[in-house]
Image (tube, rainbow, N blue to C red):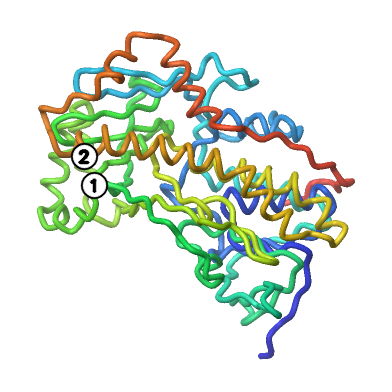
């Protein structure tokens, strides 16, 4: 069949936190947007499921917080780090926000909630199962995208293409944007272990005996992240599942009797960690934000928060010029100028943690001792509160400045 052709003001490639938040805010401000997500739904296990206090503050500013918190979630008031014999906590209970905690919620619930409310605005269009394959250019300017959907090939022409398609972004690849790779010493294995009702509620990182495990309370199960040395997955698989279950039991003895539920490597998902960033986030007619502009390490679980904050900042700057048809290269550069500093500083802190804690813990085994400042910081509450602020709010939190166009009633199900 012939290519279907569409026209929109802003074509958003990728239905993750940055893309759906940007699409929602622009549509709320009266801009026509088309969000394209290559998967048929948002149901992806082991995605970032942390909704930070600064994101909850955004939901409050949108008047959606009460409805949002009716979705199933757990509250994390601190994050405990067990580093050898040192215990350190990131304390969220003193954050200057309405919600003094991080909400632990499946990302698909967060995205479905935003999409549902986005549909209240006539300019919001979400195309699921639509994979962008290329950019359309005219005289050096990006003017749209080519994609494949359920009904075949489509072209979406737009005043602006926003690349929000993550660390493996097709948009930044096709745009030829230069990527600086910052490196990462580890990969992550995600899995589930059953959780007993009498076990602790707060998320924790445990580093000992050359192993690192992150535990996130998801009600009746623990969402677990087991860190391995970069490129070590094949060797781990070659050792076999019994050896891997023994590794888990050694670092989390309380759950040793539950590791037997892992009977196939299909239950264990590999996340190949990469930390990188674009030197320039935009070209005429195109802007990248979120992981497409700056892929984050999973340390601190802050990638979702950075993506959401990028979406808010981009909407704040671009809603008016997009509505007026006057979006310029200067507008796009201003988004990078606003968000580049928090992204780079956060990556710098993550790399410090990777090099001085993660890499050493994986290599040194029982001899691992965290750096002296970390050991000293465990004795001071102000250090724990500062850590809580860095994780829970981040650097340069954004606030909603876009207006609201008249919404319609929520769609009936």
* Local crowd size for mark 1, using a 10 Å CA cut-off: few (<14), some (14–19), many (≥20): some
* Place of residue 235 in the rendered image (x, y in percent of width and height, measured from the top left): 14, 56
* Place of residue 34 in the rendered image (x, y in percent of width and height, measured from the top left): 71, 63
* Place of residue 289 in the rendered image (x, y in percent of width and height, measured from the top left): 59, 53
Q: Is residue 199 left or right of residue 27?
A: left
* Local crowd size for mark 2, using a 10 Å CA cut-off: few (<14), some (14–19), many (≥20): many
Looking at the image, can residue 305 be seen?
no
**Residue to which mark 2 is pinned:** 259
Q: Residue at x 74, y 74 (%)?
A: 157
Residue 72 in which image quadrant: top right
Total tally of numbered discs in the picture: 2
Label 2: state its secondary structure: helix
* Place of residue 174 in the rendered image (x, y in percent of width and height, measured from the top left): 53, 72
Looking at the image, can residue 16 be seen?
yes
Q: CA distance from mark 2 to mark 1?
A: 6 Å
Is residue 178 placed above or below 95 in the rendered structure?
below
Q: Which mark is residue 194?
A: none
Q: Residue at x 18, y 33 (%)?
A: 257
Q: Nearer the viewer, residue 320 or 29?
A: 320
Q: Residue at x 15, y 35 (%)?
A: 210
**Residue to which mark 1 is pinned:** 262
Q: Is residue 275 left or right of residue 151?
A: left
Q: Is residue 85 left or right of residue 295?
A: left
Q: Residue at x 60, y 48 (%)?
A: 111
Residue 228 in which image quadrant: top left
Q: Nearer the viewer, residue 140 or 9?
A: 140
Disc 2 + disc 1, Cβ < 8 Å: yes
Q: Is residue 346 left or right of residue 271?
A: right
Label 1: state its secondary structure: loop
Quarter of the image where the N terminus is located: bottom right
């Amino acid at each position: 069949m012939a290519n279907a052709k569409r026209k929109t003001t802003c074509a958003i490639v990728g239905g993750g936190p940055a893309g759906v938040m940007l699409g929602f805010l622009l549509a709320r401000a009266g801009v026509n947007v088309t969000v394209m997500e290559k998967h048929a739904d948002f149901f992806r296990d082991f995605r970032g499921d942390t909704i930070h206090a600064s994101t909850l503050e955004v939901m409050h500013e949108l008047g959606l917080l009460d409805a949002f918190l009716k979705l199933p979630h757990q509250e994390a008031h601190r994050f405990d780090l067990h580093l050898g014999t040192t215990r350190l906590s990131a304390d969220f209970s003193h954050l200057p926000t309405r919600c003094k905690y991080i909400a632990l919620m499946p990302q698909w619930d967060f995205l479905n909630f935003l999409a549902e409310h986005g549909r209240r605005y006539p300019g919001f269009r979400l195309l699921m199962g639509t994979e962008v394959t290329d950019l359309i250019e005219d005289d050096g300017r990006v003017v749209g995208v080519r994609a494949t959907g359920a009904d075949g090939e489509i072209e979406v022409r737009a005043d602006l293409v926003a690349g929000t398609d993550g660390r493996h972004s097709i948009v930044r690849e096709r745009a030829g944007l230069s990527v600086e790779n910052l490196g990462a010493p580890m990969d992550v294995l995600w899995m589930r272990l059953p959780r007993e009702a009498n076990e602790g509620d707060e998320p924790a990182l445990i580093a000992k005996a050359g192993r690192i495990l992150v535990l996130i309370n998801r009600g009746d199960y623990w969402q677990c992240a087991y860190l391995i040395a970069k490129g070590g997955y094949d060797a781990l698989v070659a050792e076999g599942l019994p050896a891997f279950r023994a590794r888990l039991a050694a670092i989390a003895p309380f759950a040793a009797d539950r590791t037997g539920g892992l009977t196939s490597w299909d239950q264990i998902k590999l996340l190949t960690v990469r930390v990188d960033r674009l030197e320039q986030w935009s070209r005429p007619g195109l802007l990248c934000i979120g992981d497409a502009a700056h892929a984050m390490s999973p340390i601190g679980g802050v990638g979702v928060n950075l993506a959401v904050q990028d979406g808010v900042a981009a909407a704040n700057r671009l809603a008016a010029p997009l509505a007026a048809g006057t979006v310029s290269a200067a507008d796009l550069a201003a988004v990078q100028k606003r968000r580049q500093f928090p992204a780079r500083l956060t990556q710098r802190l993550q790399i410090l943690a990777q090099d001085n804690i993660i890499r050493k813990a994986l290599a040194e085994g029982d001899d691992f001792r965290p750096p002296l400042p970390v050991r000293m910081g465990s004795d001071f509450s102000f250090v724990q509160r500062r850590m809580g602020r860095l994780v829970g709010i981040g650097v340069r939190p954004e606030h909603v400045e876009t207006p609201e166009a008249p919404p319609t009633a929520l769609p009936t199900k």
